[in-house]
Amino acid sequence: MSEQVTRTRGRRQVKVGTVVSNRMDKTVVVSVAKPVTDRLYQRQIRRTTKFHAHDAENRCQIGDQVEIVATRPLSKTKRWRVRDILKRAEQR
């Protein structure tokens, strides 16, 4: 009568962004934009942040829209993993 122990990782942080660089091996740089309100003028401004994400199979190309998920530290700057490619970039 052994119980199967299921480990849950809790709710991980998930972000959607655009790949801006894939020059590194197994790493992509993802730019995530979020709207913030200007304190003085009360207008919406788009702020962007860049995240380094792990891409094990080197599948991502520049311009792809990807979903990244928070993970343990993989290197000095990598704290995110590519979960899924939502939309491929148009080929020229």
Image: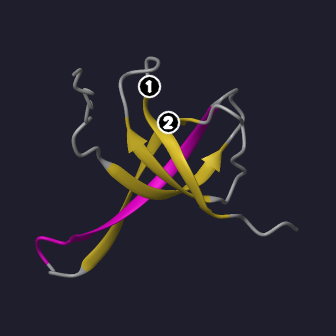
Residue 12's image quarter?
Answer: top left
The image quarter in which residue 15 lies:
bottom left
Closest to the observer, 17 or 67:
67
* Residue reaching furthest to the right: 92
The question of residue 32 being in magenta is answered with yes
| Main SS class of the magenta portion in the image | strand
Residue position marked by numbered label 2 in the rendering: 52
* Circle 2: element type: strand
Residue 72 sits in which quadrant?
A: top left
Colour mapping used in the image: secondary structure
Q: x%, y% of residue 33?
A: 40, 62
Disc assigned to residue 77:
1
Question: Quadrant of the image for the N terminus?
Answer: top left
Q: Say what secondary structure mark 1 lies in.
A: loop
Q: Which kind of residue does numbered mark 2 sit on?
A: His
Position of residue 83 measured from the top left corner of the image (x, y, whole percent):
51, 47
Which residue corresponds to the image point at 72% horizontal and 44% vertical from the top-left?
59
Seen as rendered, the residue at the extreme left is 40
Measured along the vertical axis of the image, is residue 75 above or below residue 86?
above
Q: Is residue 32 above or below residue 38?
A: above
**Residue 65 picture location, percent across and down:** 58, 61
Q: Which residues are magenta?
A: 27-40
- Name the residue type under label 1: Thr
Left or right: where does residue 48 sit relative to residue 31? left
Residue at 31% from the left image edge and 73% from the top image edge: 45
* Label 1 with label 2: CB-CB less than 8 Å: yes
The quadrant of the image that shows the C terminus is bottom right
For the point 11% across and 70% down, which residue is it? 39
Lower sequence index among marks 1 and 2:
2
